[in-house]
Structures are given as C-alpha cells and as structure tokens.
Amino acid sequence: MPPSAANKYDTGIPPASTDELTEGLTNLYDTGAPPATLEELADGATRKAMLDAEKTKLTDIEANAKDDQTGPEVRDLIVGITETERKIVLTEPQTGEFKVIAIHRNAAGNPEYDWDDVPEA
C-alpha cells in the first residue's frame, strides 16, 4: 500500500536535501497529524483558524453592520449617545447663525471655539 493510502499526512520519504524540492515549494511534507482542536495550536501559528466563538462574533457583526447608512441615520445614532460618552458638540443654529464646530480650552485654560464660516439659511 502506498504511504499516502495508509496515512493521508505521510507523503513519502522526504528528499535528502531541500535542493531536491521543486522551486517555490515550501513545507512540502507535513510533519504530523493535525491537532484535535484549534486550542491545541500555539498562538501565532500560521494555520490557526477561527474558533467557534470568534466565528459567532464575526457573524453577529456582519448581521448588524450597515454599509448603506445615510447621513441623517448616522446623526440620529450619534445624538442617541449620552453627552458624556458622545464627546461631540451638538448645535442648533437658527437662520443667520453659525454652527459651532469645536469647543476647547486653550493653554491658559480659557474656553475657545471654532465655528462654520457659512451661516444657516
């Protein structure tokens, strides 16, 4: 029986030197049976696949992801965040007033702000 029929991971007797390998091939011969679970692979192993928990997390992200959100949808989500978490200044300028873009303290500790150059219509 050929070696490959007895053990699918045994590809035969390796060459005496790597000079006998076809140009461009690497790791032609598998050196052992695969681990029973992914947890047995060392961190950083090049062939490590995702664990079931990681697959589930990715699936949840993909299911809840939206790549077609409009500006108003994004704005509504941002407005829904609490003020202390949001870290964004929301302004509602009236006609002729300017939108505040940023509020900050200068080196002396005094408040400063930046505003849009175009007034609201």
Image (cartoon, rainbow, N blue to C red):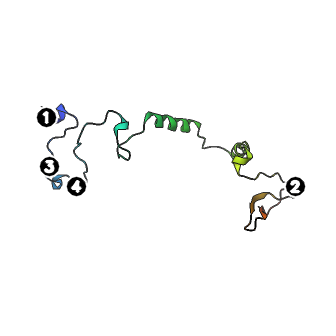
The spot of residue 10 in percent (x, y) is: 19, 38
- Disc 3 designates what residue? 15
| Residue neighbourhood size for the residue with mark 4, other residues' Cα within 10 Å, grouped as few (<14), some (14–19), many (≥20) | few
Return the residue found at the far bottom: 108
Q: Secondary structure at mark 4?
A: loop
Mark 1 or mark 2, earlier in chain: 1
The spot of residue 48 in percent (x, y) is: 37, 42
Mark 1 or mark 4, earlier in chain: 1
Residue type at the position of mark 2 = Thr
Cα gap from disc 3 to disc 1, whole angstroms: 17 Å
Cα gap from disc 4 to disc 2, whole angstroms: 72 Å
- Disc 1 designates what residue? 2
- Disc 2 designates what residue? 95
User: Do the numbered discs 4 and 2 sit on residues whose CB atoms are within 8 Å?
Assistant: no
Q: Which mark is residue 116?
A: none
The residue at the point 80 percent across, 57 percent down is 99
Cα gap from disc 1 to disc 4, whole angstroms: 25 Å
Looking at the rendering, in which quadrant would you find the N terminus? Answer: top left
Looking at the rendering, in which quadrant would you find the C terminus? Answer: bottom right
User: Do the numbered discs 4 and 3 sit on residues whose CB atoms are within 8 Å?
Assistant: no
Cα gap from disc 1 to disc 2, whole angstroms: 85 Å
51 over 88 or under it: above or below = above
| Residue neighbourhood size for the residue with mark 3, other residues' Cα within 10 Å, grouped as few (<14), some (14–19), many (≥20) | few
Mark 3 or mark 1, earlier in chain: 1
The spot of residue 51 in percent (x, y) is: 42, 36
Q: Secondary structure at mark 3?
A: loop
- Disc 4 designates what residue? 23
User: Do the numbered discs 3 and 1 sit on residues whose CB atoms are within 8 Å?
Assistant: no
Q: Quadrant of residue 93?
A: bottom right
